[in-house]
Image (cartoon, rainbow, N blue to C red):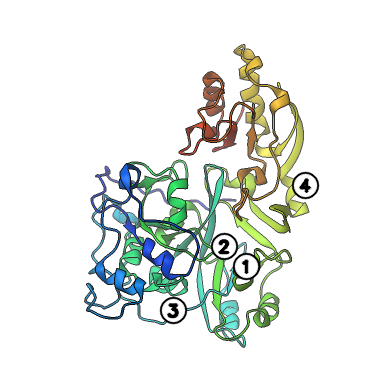
Amino acid sequence: MRRARQRAVRPPRRAALGGALVVVLLAAACGGTSGEEAPTGPEATEVADSPTATDGEDRAASGDPGGPSDSEDGDGSSDGEQPTVGLDPAFAVDPPGRLKDLPRTADILVQTRAGIPEETLAEIRDLEGVQDVEQFSMLQVGIENRVLNLAAVDPASFRRFTPGQVPQSREVWDRVAGGELAIAPELQKKLPIDEQGFVELDQGSPQVHLGALAPQIENAVDAVVNVKWGEELGAEPGNALLISTGITAPDKVVKPLTALLPRQTSVQRLDSVARFGLDINAKQTAFVVGSVSEAVGVFNYTVLGGGRIAPAESWVRTHITTAQVPILGSVTCNKAIIPQLTAALREVVETGLADEINPGEYAGCYYPRFIAGSTTLSNHSFGLALDLNTPGNQRGTVGEMDRTVVAIFKKWGFGWGGDWRYTDPMHFEAVRIVDVR
């Protein structure tokens, strides 16, 4: 069941004055190959009205030790003032200030169904080879058929585990503490960010402002918010750990670590992920939150290779079914959406538009795999999305879907890919579960 969330009322939004802090220079400092450039042109001004970096940050990225920093702390950041955008103070925590501890390597990621007790945490810290441990909340949010790993964190301590020079960038973590979102730079063009730099992480929740583009922990974290945002989104407190093993090989820690944790816990070696891709022997876990969270529950799976995954058989038995629906005939989808899918298709028939959906061009609903070329889960993995009339509705086009059909599907709780920034007009996905009576 999804945790009850405290609903906060956000005051009327002002225009974002500061824009997003763009830390693209840090991507190069990490030795990555993302190839991101500083945003330019009209599209960039939607979320990046401010300068991309301070002079101190430029020196740090280039490796030039000369010259004083623009920050009195000497950490290549600004003066640490809170952001000036129109933010809800209900989502702010104390700013972390300057980095007080040494950065750590993120070697192992642990995800459990529930929070990890203090006594277990103490035992993990005492394991031979464990240098440091950071407890936080990990949740998955589905945005435009892309399931993002969102970490709800204490900015003061979590920052130590982030890559490159991100731990020293005080402004990034002041913005997260102030209630803003930090994302990996490559996600900027893939999220539905409005002209003022806000994005909705869950239908019905207040929108969060994009405050920083900064590299995240590869194949582990896509975006970061503070703990108050985690509470709003229904995160399970303390259900994840980052473990640093320092000079000890992580594989020497995995076995004794696993022995301390509940069954079905996901223990992922991030060092091997970086070199070889996701471990096909390790259990993976997704804790989806949001309007359709109860339709997914806890999603355990293993990686098969070739972009395919194998959900736990117990999950498939309880969540996936094959049913007969109007127009399409037999479909295999998540049990939770069958009633509203049936209702939507029945209304299409009753409206006289059945011929606008070609059952021979239906491309399926449930197929467990990553989005092509990534390790990001799709809503098709949960059986919550379906593709219709595929030949005439390719990505990046306006598509040929009848707009009355689209309106009917929206009425019955489905979002349409034709509304996305990078359109996918064949795609419909459940964005809320409708009680069909």
Q: Which mark is residue 273?
A: 1
**Closer-to-camera residue (254/54):** 54
User: Alpha-carbon neighbours of circle 4 within 10 Å: few (<14), some, or many (≥20)?
Assistant: few
Q: Is residue 412 left or right of residue 19?
A: right
- From where the camera sits, is residue 201 visible? no
For marks 1 and 4, the one nearer the N-term is: 1
The residue where tag 4 is placed is: 317
User: Alpha-carbon neighbours of circle 2 within 10 Å: few (<14), some, or many (≥20)?
Assistant: some
Hey, which quadrant is residue 122 in on the image? Answer: bottom right
User: Which tag is nearer the camera, tag 3 or tag 4?
Assistant: 3
Q: Marks 3 and 1, how far apart in space?
A: 20 Å
Disc 1 and disc 2 in contact, CB within 8 angstroms: yes
The residue where tag 3 is placed is: 103
For marks 3 and 1, the one nearer the N-term is: 3
**Closer-to-camera residue (416/187):** 187
Kind of residue sitting beneath label 1: Val
Hey, which quadrant is residue 139 in on the image? Answer: bottom right
Q: Marks 2 and 4, how far apart in space?
A: 28 Å
* x 64%, y 71%: residue: 272
User: Can you give x and y, in whole percent of width and height, for residue 100 in the image?
Assistant: 35, 80
